[in-house]
C-alpha cells in the first residue's frame, strides 16, 4: 500500500514539475528558517544561565529624570552595593566599576589584548558562578593593586611560570597599573553579557578615585 502511494506521489510530481518544485523549495526554506529562529532563540534565552542562582540575581539600575528629560540607565552609583549588604534579605551584593574594553596586559615584554576589564571585589565570586581555579574567592580581590586573570589570558601571558604572585602591567582607559596576580578564574562562557579577561580589585579603583568610595 505504501509503495502504491509513493508511486502516485512521484507521478503527480512529474506531471507538475514547476508547481512541485515551488512547493518543495518553499517548504525546505520554511523549515530552514524555523530551525534557525529556534536555534537563535535558544541561544538568546541561554544568556547568563550558567549562573547557579540566575533567577535570584538582580541588577540595580538608575532612572534619571530632569524636567521633561527621562532616561533609564543600566548602571548605579558604587555605594549601592555597600548599602544593599545592610539588608538581611540580600545574601550578597557586588559592584563593577571602570569597565573598559580593548585593554592591554603585559608581562616581561609580552603583551596580550583583553576584550573587557573591570574593577570588582571578592563578593563578585559569591554572586556569579565563576569558579576560581587558583586563589581564595573570599579575599582574592581585597588588597589594592591585585588582579584576577582568566585562565586563557594567564596561559597566553605566562605559559611557562606560575602566574600567582607575579606582577603584571595593565593599560586601560589611558591609565597604567601594575598589579599582583592573586587568582585565576575560569573563562567566562560565551553566552554571557560580560566577558572579562581580568578583574582588578575595587580597592585599586577607589585608591585612584577616592570621590567614588563607599560612604
Image: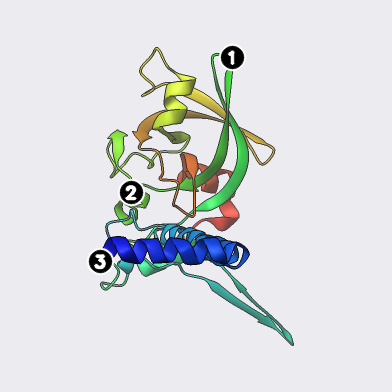
Q: Residue at x 53, y 60 (%)?
A: 14
Residue 196: image location, x then y, percent: 49, 43
Classify residue 158 as left or right of residue 111: left
Classify residue 212 as left or right of residue 140: right
Q: Which mark is residue 125?
A: 2
Q: Nearer the viewer, residue 193 or 99?
A: 193
Q: Residue at x 31, y 51 (%)?
A: 129
Q: Earlier in the sequence, mark 1 or mark 3?
A: 3
Q: Is residue 5 visible?
A: yes
Q: CA distance from mark 2 to mark 1?
A: 31 Å
Q: Earlier in the sequence, mark 2 or mark 1?
A: 1
Q: Which mark is residue 1?
A: 3
The secondary element bearing badge 1 is classed as: loop
Residue 173: image location, x then y, percent: 66, 41
Q: CA distance from mark 2 to mark 3?
A: 64 Å
Q: Nearer the viewer, residue 64 or 2?
A: 2
Q: CA distance from mark 1 to mark 3?
A: 77 Å
Residue to which mark 1 is pinned: 109
User: How many other residues sit within 10 Å of disc 3, few (<14), some (14-19) or many (≥20)?
Assistant: few
Amino acid at each position: 500500500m505504501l509503495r502504491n502511494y509513493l508511486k502516485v506521489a512521484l507521478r503527480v510530481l512529474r506531471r507538475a514539475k514547476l508547481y512541485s518544485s515551488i512547493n518543495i523549495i518553499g517548504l525546505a526554506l520554511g523549515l530552514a528558517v524555523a530551525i534557525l529562529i529556534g536555534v537563535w532563540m535558544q541561544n538568546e534565552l541561554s544568556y547568563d544561565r550558567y549562573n547557579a542562582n540566575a533567577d535570584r540575581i538582580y541588577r540595580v539600575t538608575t532612572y534619571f529624570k530632569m524636567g521633561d528629560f527621562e532616561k533609564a540607565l543600566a548602571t548605579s552609583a558604587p555605594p549601592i552595593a555597600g548599602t544593599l549588604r545592610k539588608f538581611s534579605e540580600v545574601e550578597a551584593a557586588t559592584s563593577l566599576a571602570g569597565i573598559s574594553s580593548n585593554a592591554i596586559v603585559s608581562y616581561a615584554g609580552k603583551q596580550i589584548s583583553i576584550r573587557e576589564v573591570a574593577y570588582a571585589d571578592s563578593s563578585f565570586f559569591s554572586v556569579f558562578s565563576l569558579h576560581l581555579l587558583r586563589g581564595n574567592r573570599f579575599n582574592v580581590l581585597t588588597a589594592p593593586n591585585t588582579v584576577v586573570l582568566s585562565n586563557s589570558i594567564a596561559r597566553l601571558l605566562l605559559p611557562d611560570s606560575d602566574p600567582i604572585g607575579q606582577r603584571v602591567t595593565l593599560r586601560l582607559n589611558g591609565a597604567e597599573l601594575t598589579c599582583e596576580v592573586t587568582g585565576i578564574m575560569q573563562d567566562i562562557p560565551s553566552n554571557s553579557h560580560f566577558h572579562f579577561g581580568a578583574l582588578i580589585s575595587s580597592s585599586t579603583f577607589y585608591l585612584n578615585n577616592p570621590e567614588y568610595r563607599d560612604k
